[in-house]
Amino acid sequence: MYEGYHFAGMHLIWWIVWALVLFRIIMNPYNPLRRRKKIGSPLEILNSRFASGEITQEQYLEHKTVLEHYLGL
């Protein structure tokens, strides 16, 4: 009745859909084997900022006392 041409367009669309799905799987930017970077505790972050020179000694001591007060360190 349709002589095989009725679903020709749909067949092409499915090939494109499957190609896109396979491309997405292969080119996935998320790598499950890669581990997330550990951020660290607030005191470790403060220590690293002081060590890199981002903050002065006065700022470091001020922030450290605040952290010790609120975190109970």
Image: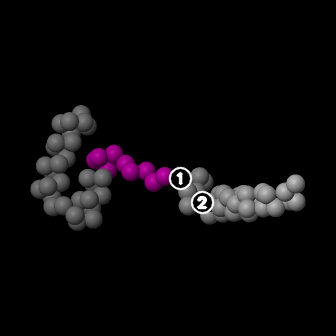
Q: Is disc 2 placed on a helix, strand or loop?
A: loop
Residue 70 seen: yes
Q: Is disc 1 placed on a helix, strand or loop?
A: loop
- From the viewer's perspective, is the residue at label 2 or at label 1 nearer? 2
Q: CA distance from mark 2 to mark 1?
A: 16 Å
**Which quadrant: the C terminus?**
top left
Where is residue 42 drawn, in percent x and y? 29, 46
In depth, the one of 32 and 52 nearer the eye is: 32
Q: Which residue in the protein does label 2 denote?
A: 28
Where is residue 68 drawn, in percent x and y? 21, 39
Residue 2 shown left or right of residue 55 in the figure: right
Instruction: Give the residue at x 18% y 36%.
Output: 69
Instruction: Give the residue at x 56% y 61%.
Output: 29
The magenta span reads 34-44
| Residue at the front extreme of this rendering | 1
Where is residue 24 drawn, in percent x and y? 62, 60
In depth, the one of 39 and 63 nearer the eye is: 39
Residue 37 lies in the magenta stretch:
yes
Where is residue 70 drawn, in percent x and y? 20, 36
Bin the neighbour count of mark 2 within 10 Å (Cα to Cα): few under 14, some 14-19, many 20 and up: few
Total number of numbered discs in the rendering: 2
Residue 62 shown left or right of residue 10 in the figure: left
Residue 38 lies in the magenta stretch:
yes
Bin the neighbour count of mark 1 within 10 Å (Cα to Cα): few under 14, some 14-19, many 20 and up: few
Residue type at mark 1? Arg
The disc placed on residue 35 is: 1
